[in-house]
Amino acid sequence: MRVSGLIFVRTGCYVTLGLLFGMLAFARTSAHKRRTGRSPWHIHPLVWGIVSVFVTFLVTLLSIVYVAIFGTLVSVIACSTISQPSREPSATAGSRYRAVPGCSPVPELGPEVGPGQQSPPVTALKAWLPDPTGRHELRYFDGSGWTEHVANAGVISVDRS
């Protein structure tokens, strides 16, 4: 939004300058023609004014393209220095995920182990992976299946559908 505002301000300035330079070119060429009887390079003063306006509009177009390219490069450089969010399932202090009001952090998943029982062996990867349904960016895989816990743009929530 800031770049587009800058483009419109810059365009307005160039249009104004283009019209100003066109009028000055016409006035100076007319004055030269009155003094000497011929215009510089034998070009009519009106043509000089129109060419000046056209050149200014061309410079405006080139500046818009420059701002678009430069703005894109700056945003790519700025975004590449941001670290990626943690892939931990819970929203802890060290995590880059933000807690969503009304949603609790992901609990430890898996069967509950009572006193005197051994926990079952972990045989599969527990991780945030791309959502196979395609409705969200990431979905948590608990080692045996996909859970209802999802993440979009670093925000963890629960998929109710």
Image: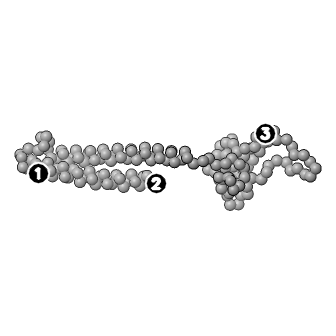
Query: Mark 1 vs mark 2: which is more N-terminal?
Result: 2
For this view, does 123 lie left or right of residue 15?
A: right
Query: Mark 3 vs mark 1: which is more N-terminal?
Result: 1
Asked if residue 135 shows in the view, the reply is no
* Location of residue 32 in the rendering, given as x and y in whole percent from the top left corner: 10, 48
Q: Report which residue position mark 1 lands on.
A: 31
Q: Residue furthest bottom?
A: 101
Q: Report which residue position mark 3 lands on.
A: 124
* Location of residue 134 in the rendering, given as x and y in whole percent from the top left corner: 65, 43
Residue sitting at 65 percent across and 56 percent down?
98
Label 1: element kind:
helix
Task: Look at label 1 and name its amino acid.
Answer: Ala
- Mark 3–mark 2 Cα distance, whole angstroms, equals 45 Å
Numbered circle sitting on residue 1: 2
Q: Residues within 10 Å of mark 1 (few under 14, many from 20)?
A: some
Residue sitting at 57 percent across and 48 percent down?
82
Label 3: element kind:
loop
